[in-house]
Amino acid sequence: MTTTTAAVTGVHEQHRPVPGIPLGRVVRVELRKMFNTRSGFWLMASLVIVGVLATVGTILFAPDDQLTHNTFAAAIGFPMTIVLPIIAILSITGEWSQRTGLTTFTLVPHRGRVLLAKTVSSVLVGVGAMLVALVVGVVGNVVGTAITGTDLVWDLSAAQFGTIVIGSLLCLLTGTMLGMLLRSSPAALVTYFVMTLVLPTLFGILATNQPDFVDVQPWVDAELARSFLFEGPPQGEQWAQVAVTAVLWLVLPALVGLRAVLRSEVK
Amino acid sequence: MITVENLSKRYGSTVAVDHIDFTAEAGRVTGFLGPNGAGKSTTMRMMVGLTKPTTGTATIAGRRFADLPNPGLDVGVMLDASAQHAGRTGREILTIAAWTTGVPGRRVEEMLDLVSLSPTEADRRVGSYSLGMRQRLGLATALIGNPRVLVLDEPANGLDPAGIRWMRDLLRDFADGGGTVLLSSHLLREVEVIADDIVMIGRGRIVCQGSKADLLRGVGSVARATDTRALRAALHAAGMDTTVSDDGSVATDGEPERIGQVAFAAGVVLTELRHTEGGLEDMFLELTADHQREGKNRERKAA
């Protein structure tokens, strides 16, 4: 068996019979890389800090009758949709902007594998952050209602939490996609905010001026379609709209980005 | 052993590397020498799969880099010591490399020790490192998987003379233990000091290659005799041209053995006889003159 392999590949020197690098190990490395820089550390810390600030803010400023679990979840969930994509973007663009790719892609000379590991580790962080948000929301709800003396209202269903997680992960993966497509931290960050802040406004203006567009909008406006996920489980056609906008604004550009990463030169 | 065959890289109409072939042998330090922009870095990036070659292949002990199951255990690579996340500590960078290659965590301490980075320095962020410290860290990263082959781009850049001596000793030991070292430099002195073999490249093409000893040895010999005039007369009689320098040494284009025979036959006492020293520097300047920016000025002056 060994001799056959040697004969086929024409090996002159003895290669050590080493196993390849398992994907789990690359994921673990990529997770560590998200935390072990100064910026990475504070970005992760900001997830928790923002969650706590949002909770305190809700207790202080929300009308007493709205101190429900749903309110807390929404208050914490919104900043997450901003921070999580930034984490996903920097995880990828750092390899180019900070030029660490020279080391990363020589230790693991299969870029698709590295990108997969980065995507998996970003999703893990995203899910972890959502669970933290859930817990902070529970604590906020209990403490908040205790302070104001109102009744505890648990109005966040499991299904609803599930769709919020999906919505947040779609935001996060949009960051992953932009990182692959642009491979530059500033460019990807700016584009993300154009996509989530400027583009929906433009679609809104279009819908106001072109009544025909109103029916089309949910099929092309990813932000609008995602809002169905955040505002309670989507109904029938809305799921299809979420899927169609995700293909249009996430899957297709991600494929273009993947191709670009695989072909690009790492300098 | 590293084998490069027919390797070239073209960017549009620009040819960065033009069909080059060479090998870096095990047990030897091979210096990859050339002026800036000659194609050294592009060649090294192609070797490790960061840049796709237009033609040709590079193999490490018979295998393409991308086919190595865990490259860090076979090949240590340092292409740019500055290409590190400024916000990460030296120790973290080594830990990541150790995790990726799957070597035990104690390798991190061993490598820090090997490249003389103190624990305090290792816990500082790389953004505050000097270039010399980054080179040491880069070398530690390359060596962490205990590889048999090293590919280093400008490793001596930024090191002080003591650092260069340290690196020379380290690479010497590595090669003496049977390892293969390929290192690039645009500084002749560094290569002259460290390398056994030299591959010289200019404008994407290999200008010359061979052992340093062969390349250093020039054509002809230099002789000195108690009677300079008698020696010259004998050499002229034997059909050789001579030039005599101020210090009395006689230069000819004949090989030392021939000069010795002529002197012996003529009864001239030689006090010194040796090969002309080519001086790698002259060769480097000569061979790469037309490839360098400075070359143009020199030509203009000559004209």
Image (spheres, coloured by chain):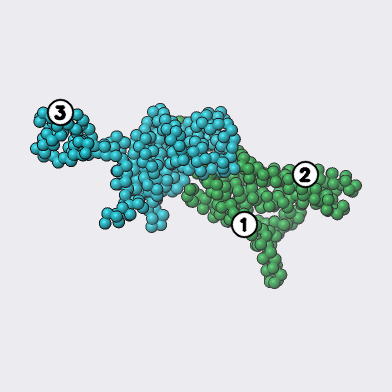
Chain colours: A green, B cyan
Q: In this rendering, which labeled residue sits more in front, label 3 or label 1?
A: 3
* Residue nearest the observer in this picture, A133 or B112: B112
- Rendered image quadrant of residue B98: top right
* Amino acid identity at mark 1: Val
> Which residue position holds label 2?
A136
* Residue nearest the observer in this picture, B102 or B222: B222
- Rendered image quadrant of residue A28: top right
Label 2 sits on a secondary structure element that is: helix
Q: Which chain hosts label 2? A: A
x then y, percent, for residue A82: 68, 52
In this view, B255 is above or below B295 = above
Label 1 sits on a secondary structure element that is: helix
Q: Quadrant of the N terminus of chain B?
A: top left
Mark 2 crowdedness (10 Å alpha carbons): few <14, some 14-19, many ≥20:
many
Q: Quadrant of the C terminus of chain B?
A: bottom left
> Which residue position holds label 1?
A190
In this view, A157 is above or below B166 = below
Q: Which chain hosts label 3? A: B
**Residue B100 in view:** no
Mark 3 crowdedness (10 Å alpha carbons): few <14, some 14-19, many ≥20:
some
> Which residue position holds label 3?
B269
* Residue at horizontal 54 percent and vertical 48 percent from the top: A96
Disc 3 from disc 1: Cα separation = 83 Å
